[in-house]
Amino acid sequence: MSINIAIDGPVASGKGAVTKGLSKKLGIPALDTGAIYRAVTLFLLDNEIDIHDEKKILMSLNKISVRLYLAENHDLRVFTQGQDVTPRIRENRVSLAVPVVAAYVGVRDYVNRQIALVASQGNYILEGRDIGTVVLPNADYKFFLTASLEVRAKRRKADLDAKGEEYSLLEVMAQVKERDEQDMNRAIAPLRQAPDAIYIDNSNLTLEQTIDTLAKYIKL
């Protein structure tokens, strides 16, 4: 019997880092569902396919080969067309374009099928924006992780700075706020807390404290 743990939340809420940390603490592989959306978006951008042209995007889905591989240390590697694109899917141009791509019904169906297939094959911690509400509504444990806009913007800016992408804090705050509005107001599977999810605001928590907080709720 597989155990699935769903962690949802807005951009820069710490989902990725918390999921990786919780994975190491519990010994359960992590599956970053957003990585699949990012991989699809990167493919579209690389092939100069208009992200606002839904018809062309849906026609392109059959040409995209996305594969997820778990390394021995449980790190997730993302491949498209046989190439490891793990670092590239975090580029800011992808971050700005992915909300548009992820809003299309056909894209969400494509990604959700892959996620559900992988999750059914073993124990996984899954993070995203609609895992507990749409993708795996029957997940054994559900968490909704968030933080204040300013805290999330600072985290996002730190990530961009580390990659050499320079933006002011105000610019990043505007980007994060716009992403929130896109995620919460999209017609299909909007970002929201599942009724049975545990709400955790980690604005004033360290990464380790956040991981420990989640772990206390999980019984293996």
Image (cartoon, grey):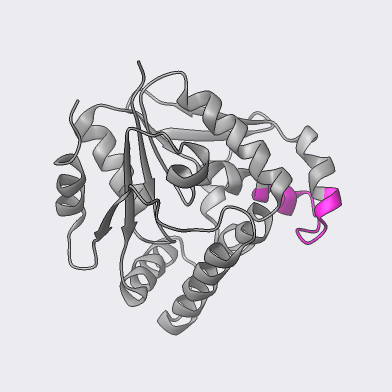
Q: Give the quarter of the figure containing the N terminus.
A: top left
Residue 127 horizontal/vertical position (percent) = 41, 44
Q: Nearer the viewer, residue 90 or 147?
A: 147
Q: Residue at x 47, y 52 (%)?
A: 129
Q: Is residue 152 depicted above or below 124 in this figure?
A: below
Q: Nearer the viewer, residue 25 or 92?
A: 25
Residue 153 horizontal/vertical position (percent) = 39, 72
Question: In this picture, which residue range is highlighted in magenta?
Answer: 41-56
Q: Is residue 139 depicted above or below 202 in this figure?
A: above
As drawn, the residue found furthest toward the bottom would be: 170
Q: Residue at x 40, y 56 (%)?
A: 193
Q: Residue at x 57, y 52 (%)?
A: 189
Residue 172 horizontal/vertical position (percent) = 46, 75
Residue 140 horizontal/vertical position (percent) = 33, 32
Q: Let me know if residue 116 appears in the view.
A: yes
Question: Position of 77 compared to 15: left or right?
Answer: right
48 is within the stretch colored magenta: yes
